[in-house]
Amino acid sequence: MNFLRGVMGGPSAGPQPSGADTIQKLCDRVASSTLLDDRRDAVRALKSLSKKYRLEVGIQAMEHLIHVLQTDRSDSEIIGYALDTLYNVISNDLEEEEQEENSAKQVDDLGSQFTEIFIKQQENVTLLLTLVEEFDFHVRWPGVKLLTSLLKQQGPQVQQIILVSPMGVSRLMDLLADSREVIRNDGVLLLQQLTKSNAAIQKIVAFENAFERLLDIITEEGNSDGGIVVEDCLLLLQNLLKNNNSNQNFFKEGSYIQRMKPWFEVGDDNCGWSAQKVTNLHLMLQLVRVLVSPTNPPGATSSCQKAMFHCGLLQQLCTILMATGVPADILTETINTVSEVIRGCQTNQDYFASVNAPSNPPRPAIVVLLMSMVNERQPFVLRCAVLYCFQCFLYKNQKGQGEIVSTLLPSTIDATGNSVSAGQLLCGGLFSTDSLSNWCAAVALAHALQENATLKEQLLRVQLATSIGNPPVSLLQQCTNILSQGSKVQTRVGLLMLLCTWLSNCSIAVTHFLHNPANVPFLTGQIAENLGEEEQLVQGLCALLLGISIYYNDNSLENYRKEKLKQLIEKRIGRENFVEKLGFISKHELYSRAAQKPQPSFSSPDHMMFDHEFTKLVKELEGVISKAIYKSSEEDKKEEEVKKTLEQHDNIVTHYKKVIREQDQELEELKQRVNTLTSQNEQLQATVTQQVSQIQQHKDQYNLLKVQLGKDTQHHNSHGDTFQMNGIQTEEVSKLKEELEEWKNKHELLQGQLKEKDSVIEKLNSSQLEMGTTEQFSQTSKFGGLEHNNELQKELEMLRSQIQLQSAEISKLQMENQKLQVMNTTADPMLGDTGATAATSSELEGRLEQEIKELKSEVKALSEEKESLKQHLDSSSSTVAILQDEKSKLQREVAESKKEQDDLLVLLADQDQKISALKIKLKDLGVPVEDEDDTESGDQGDEDEDGDEEEQD
């Protein structure tokens, strides 16, 4: 107290002031002092008193402290003291001594009330967000702690204020990048509170690169070997991903699932795990389960499951599953995680079936897990996890179901007895003295038969050897024998669930069940008795089993026809009493719990009564059986007739749908052929384009030679008067004339070839016009032949125009040749003259010879080009003919398929009318009839059926 007296400036002697008076004086000093040092000392004193005198400081000083935060922001020290004082007042994290003095309720009320006062003015929270941006450690750290405390006390209100604040969430995300670990770690705690139950903030935090930063922190801290910081980061990741489909998709698309694989790299030595490592690994497994939870949309779950398989995460989890020395709770959670990673995913289920335990000899992982499930010495939670894993392995996995049932069939049982199969373990558990093993084995075997009528019939072949010397009995008969022996309730409930699943939608199994004359009297006796509450559940299941025997009865046994069984119920039980006993199942509390989620979660073995999939079966059959009990024999006959008629119509519709599918496949093949022809046409077009470019190059070369020849001609004309042809002999002139005659002949040949090309082009044009008459019909046949033929016609017209241009150029060459002849004729009179210019004439002679050679080579090149063009035109015409033949074939095929489809549509329309009339009759008779959408959904693919079952979940 001497310190307080010094602060207040009072005398050291005299009566000591009370805490409230001291706080009041300090508040006055904070409010009235003009010197910053005085205010800082007063706030420091309030901080020291805030823990002991929390109520007084909160009531008297809060307004002054907020004012300090607003006005003295330039001094980080006083801001830090003020934030610490507010944190002490608002936070409920008190010392143990203080908790002894104050009741817990009072503490909670104080923090909540002071928080409400602080956030009443939203500007206070905005001010606090601004202070958190400060880099100064003495301001930022207490600001983070204060904001975290506010979120703990009044989370939704503070979240809303931060959400509407400009860049409010983004400011807080910067805390994860702080180089000071204390602030970064407290920033993680702050974001944990900020993201609780607020999807909008969760999305903003995720898109602010939170996943990348948190995974980096986990890696830096050593993954599962890290400390409590890793735990905090994992809790924050769970907040961001749980029940947030948008963030889950962003996490998957960002390839962050691949970064989870190193978390589960466990060494060979698994002894001495620390408590923190167990906690971290437990949270990591829970995070994987969040991504593949059955409550997520089926598409999102499936994509995450595939990503986990491709990146090796599932393989890593299976390694932990088969490792030794792993703590029991981690092993249990790993089994649950593997269960949901493989649930409903065929690829993952196939991989899990191939996993072997590291034993000698190697055993399948499924067998090892089932051994734990039927072992009564194993922990209860572990046995529940193994059952869930087995259920997930068989969920929508007909291949896996067949493999399990096949281990029970006589032809596949290992006669040597060296290895234990899954079927043997299930039978052993089914008839064990442990009631929990009975229940688990019965439920597991029921999942092997779920929605698989073929396996239900095959399981009737299973024979069991009860004792030496006695004949074997069927598995079905052995189950009913145990029921009649009056075993524990849990055992009977498990067996009844197995029998109900087995007999539902399987008339042959119902016949086998009714063939035993002791079964029906046993069921009626159980239902008719007035037993206690524990036996009511068994009575309800017996009523369900008897109702299934009536509803799926094909009347093949004369003594147990539907009508006789109904009369037996009426005499021995009474219809109203039967329906009442049947309702005991859905009204039971344990039934409601089991219907909530697929994973079996029970507080104790005594509560383990119902399976999730069985609750769906009860929901489906309860109403149907109640109606079937009250129907007369005539109504049953009519219903049977209607069912048969519907089945026939369904078969007809299925047949026509199959035909339509085949025609669709044929159409696809035709489309592929058209695409092939299109690609061939494109290749031809490319070839034509290449040849056109070559022609253009030759044309340019020809123009260049023409220009050069023109220059030489001008030179000869300008000097013709001065040149004398004395030196040129008559023999050479005659040779020139002969060469000119040869040129004329070659030009005539070229003109004949041009005429032939013109005739070919005219034929192509006429054939194209004939093809044009059929193009209107081909447009409706979904083929692209018209466009390709038009393109070929354009290309042919281009080639024709080019050939015409070349013929014009050849005519020009003829004119130039005539000019050369005139020059030669004018040179004849000069032969008799002699002059002194012999050297000049020889030079002219050499030039003429060179020009003649060039002209010869040019004419030869042109003739070669003509030949190549002719070949190209011939190939184009053949291609057009082929395309025309293909088009006519496709047109005929399309016309035939269209006619067949019209006939099918007429037949389908007639069938629909008959089916609708029959449905109306069924409704009049009181039979529940599925809607058209439900009927059509039966013809859809497995994925649609999967989606419907998820929605029913």
Image: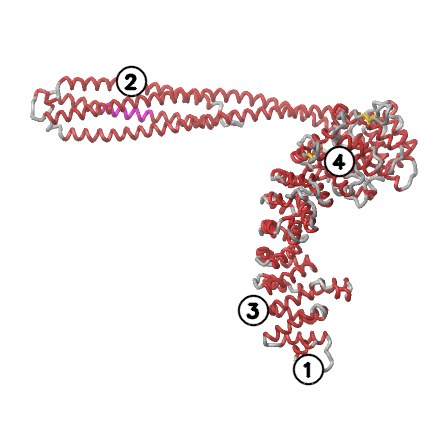
Which quadrant holds the N terminus?
bottom right
Q: Is residue 934 left or right of residue 438?
A: left
Q: Bounds of the magenta span?
A: 803-815
Upstream in the sequence, badge 3 or badge 4?
3
**Which residue is identified by label 2?**
749
Upstream in the sequence, badge 3 or badge 1?
1
Cα gap from disc 3 to disc 4, whole angstroms: 69 Å
Residue at 64% in and 43% down: 265
How packed mark 4 is, by other alpha carbons closer than 10 Å (few <14, some 14-19, many 20 or more), is many
Give the vertical position of 110 relative to 349 (above or below): below
Mark 2 or mark 4, which is nearer to you?
4
**Which residue is identified by label 3?**
74
Amino acid at the residue labelled 1: Pro
Amino acid at the residue labelled 4: Leu
Amino acid at the residue labelled 2: Leu
Nearer to me, 596 or 622:
596
Give the vertical position of 685 relative to 381 (above or below): above
**Which residue is identified by label 4?**
370
Cα gap from disc 3 to disc 1, whole angstroms: 33 Å
Tags 1 and 4 in contact by the CB under 8 Å rule? no
Residue at 73% in and 45% down: 329
Is there any visible trace of residue 626 in the rendered image? no
Tag 3 secondary structure: loop
Tag 2 secondary structure: helix
Nearer to me, 620 or 30:
30
